Amino acid sequence: MAKVAFIGLGVMGFPMAGHLKVKGGHDVTVYNRTASKAAAWAEKFGGRAAPTPAEAAKDADFVFTCVGNDDDLRSVTTGENGVLQTMKPGAILIDNTTASAEVARELDAAAKGKGCAFIDAPVSGGQAGAENGVLTVMCGGDEAIFDKAKPVIDAYARMVGLMGPAGAGQLTKMINQICIAGLVQGLAEGIHFGKRAGLDIEKVVEVISKGAAGSWQMENRHKTMNAGKYDFGFAIDWMRKDLGIVLNEARRNGAKLPVTALVDQFYGDVQAMGGNRWDTSSLLARLEK
């Protein structure tokens, strides 16, 4: 058992912190910007809630963060009441936010300056993956630190991999989002085409999902897409935030991402339709409007 702090109890963080307490058996203290949510977590899982990130992180062996973006992350880590104000020497900061590689490198340097360590550890698997404790975690950091952190991360993951130095986890998550964007657009176009051709989409997918076209998106999203229902996963607002990070990084490293840039624009079209909180499969709605 370790002393653990978890900062950020959104749709991902709330169950992830719960797995650290229940499955991992750790002593967990949480912080959330909306204090009532932290109190609800403590009541449900039997841990403690703290009034600030700094208070939550005091004496913790591992400090997890899972917040909205780079600025939120800086606020809860290096800000006035951030965790790095109180983390003890030797403690490890593990960031599950999907953020930039740049901020990951900043936090790595800041943690080392305090005698602590840092792992960037963005996740994939969505809300269902978080609730079921089967997330994929892509890590960046020093190997010796990763080896210490992995057994704790395992409480909410089915796959945890070290991808390279600080920032490599975030870069890998960017690749994950690049691949998803193209897959979902292709699936949306396929379903749209099939419907226009008068085919039974269920029969089509039953066959092609067992061949080279098969994917997680096809298996898990085609039914709801075909029904025109888009409340089953990662919201477009979040995806556009992620794709913005991807495209900014591509401008820095010179990568050419024409399909990703185009799909990002398509998601903008869906937002204009009022679909900000629809899941990413709602690209089909744009084709059918």
Image: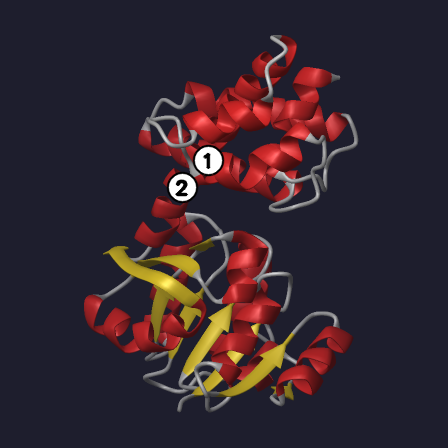
As displayed, is residue 181 above or below residue 44?
above
Residue under the image location 64 percent in, 61 percent down: 11
Q: Residue 113, which numbered label? A: none
Quadrant the N terminus occupies: bottom left
Near mark 2 (Cα within 10 A), the count class, few <14, some 14-19 or many ≥20, is some
Q: What residue type is labelled 2?
A: Asn
Residue at (42%, 74%) from the top-left corner? 155
Q: Residue at x 72, y 37 (%)?
A: 276
Q: Is residue 62 visible?
A: yes
- Secondary structure, mark 2, is helix
Q: What element carries label 1?
A: helix
- Find residue 164 and report its horizontal and vertical position in percent: 23, 54
The residue indicated by pointer 2 is 176
Picture quarter containing residue 221? top right
Q: Which of 26 and 69 is in front in this view?
A: 26
Identify the residue under disc 1.
Answer: 180
| Residue 21 spot, x, y in % from top left | 52, 83
Position of 48 with respect to 129 (left or right) is: right
Task: Answer whether labels 1 and 2 touch (C-beta < 8 Å).
Answer: yes
Report x, y in % for residue 17.
54, 75
For the C terminus, give its image quadrant.
Answer: top right
Q: How far apart are marks 1 and 2 (CA)?
A: 6 Å
What amino acid is labelled 1 in the image?
A: Ile
Measuring from the top left, give residue 283's x and y in whole percent.
62, 26
In the image: residue 251, left or right of residue 143: right
Q: Count numbered badges in the picture.
A: 2
Height in image: 84 above or below 132? Answer: below
Q: Quadrant of residue 47?
A: bottom right
